[in-house]
Amino acid sequence: MAGGKLSPRQKMINLMYLVFIAMLALNMSKEVLSAFGLLEKKITEANISTDKRNEAFMASLAVKASESPEKYSDLNTKAQTINSLSNELDDYIENIKTGMMATVPKDDQDNYEIQDKPDYLDTKFFRGDKLSKDGEEFKSKMLAYKDGMLSVIGDKYPEITNMVEDQFGLKKESPRGKNVKVDAIKFHFEGFPMIASKTKLTQIQNNIKTIQNEVLSRMLQGEQAASLVVNTSNYSTLLETPKSAYYAGEKFDGAIVLGRVDDKTKPSRAELTLDGRKLEEGKDYTFEGGRVKLNVSAGNPGDHTLEGKLVFIQDGEENEVPVNRSFATISKPNAAVIAAEKMNVVYRGVENPMIISIPGIPDNKVNARATGLKKSGKKYIMKPGSGREVVITASGTLPDGQSVSSKQTFRIKDIPRPTGTIRGEDGGSGPVRMQRQGLEKSSVGAKLFDFDFDLNIKVTGFSFKVSGQPTIKVSGNKLNAQAKGALRKAKRGETVQIFDINAKLTNNSTYKLKKISPVFVELTN
């Protein structure tokens, strides 16, 4: 367009081309600025969630340290150091962002298209080709955080060490197409639009919080078990019994044990009473390893109390562990005990395990009947049909020939509404974030959260929706070619929908599940 003589008409056309190209460049720039703003907002939301997890971790660790200082005190001290280092750098970066946004009118804080000037950080961080005083301070803070974290971490976690070095080591970078290396701060912040620099600062904050969470989790997982040296303040007496109740006059064969049961916990002597009567060693109890084995009458129906102390000799001194436990003696039963293992309800569409027994009567002498009930080994399985309730009747014969019979009513409930998933994730309170290629390969599923039964749910089809494009019906549990084609037209950051999920139970295909909740996916590329 630059050579030769041009007619007025051609000159006008060329000028229009130039104006058109300039307009395209301007619009693309605004779109990029908006993309940076939306990304910065998403990272900020993630930072808030990570902050809450870290705060909960620190609070929990503080409680553990107060309860078991010998085990968690050192870990708590390191965690406090990590927390202090992380908060110091995070607050410093937040102050930079606050100063930066103070230059933007209050009503335009979310107008990312006007945040295109690099002036704030260019003036704050640089003086000519060198860093300014504030730039040097920023560099110093980053390196101090790196050195502090590496000092706490040591060489136990090489993956985290590499992460800290890579993200906070400020290694020199090579601009694209150039053979020279420049200072990392100049490389990442000089000449960039304000919203882009703010996004990078927010990402650094995300790196801080993520590393803090990773280090604390690894350190807690690697904590060694407490010392096995006997310390009476760490022990409590427990009462072991082979059954929960005893008949009047029956021999009570329970055992008092320490929480840590081994030969090292054997007391030097015991001073015990049962309902105020002193017990004698060899006659009423014997020592068996870490247990004090009782051999006394269960007595009359009612509550009975074991009191006294267990005495340990350690370093020539006596250490006492108090004993204060009780047990109950009951009369022979005249009614059956019927209970659902899971809850006081049974679920339609699944096999509900049941325990049906009568105290004092062997299981093989107990009979139970109800619609949908069958025996499986020593237990029962209930598969309820229609209706809202089912009545189970149990009967048996006591050793003295007396018959016992009892009924129990259970509510019948349907299986709760499943939750749709992608790649095993349901997104919680927001969409699942994943790459486009990952979504193409991932499987759509359905889960029952906080349900007492493990059910195998198979997805047989679903609907797939990309904004601005027709809804696509898919068979199976993965995107088909048509859905993948629609996905490729979606923009980065766009949320696609997976809904109308159809599924069935693999071991009961006739049962109709409730409508499955949809799942939303935010594309990250």
Image (cartoon, rainbow, N blue to C red):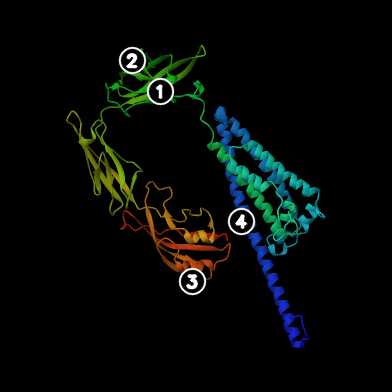
Nearest to N terminus: mark 4 or mark 1: 4
Mark 2 is on which residue type?
Asp
Q: Secondary structure at mark 3?
A: loop
| Mark number, residue 470 | 3
Nearest to N terminus: mark 4 or mark 2: 4
- Dots 4, 1 in contact, CB < 8 A: no
As rendered, which of 245 and 310 lies closer to the eye? 310
Image quadrant occupied by the C terminus: bottom right
As rendered, which of 177 and 277 lies closer to the eye? 177
Q: Secondary structure at mark 2?
A: loop
Nearest to N terminus: mark 4 or mark 3: 4
Tell me, yes or no, if residue 111 can be seen here. no
Mark 3 is on which residue type?
Pro
Mark 1 is on which residue type?
Val
Position of 364 with respect to 59 (left or right) is left
Residue that carries the numbered disc 4 in the rendered image:
42
* Residue at 66% across, 52% down: 202
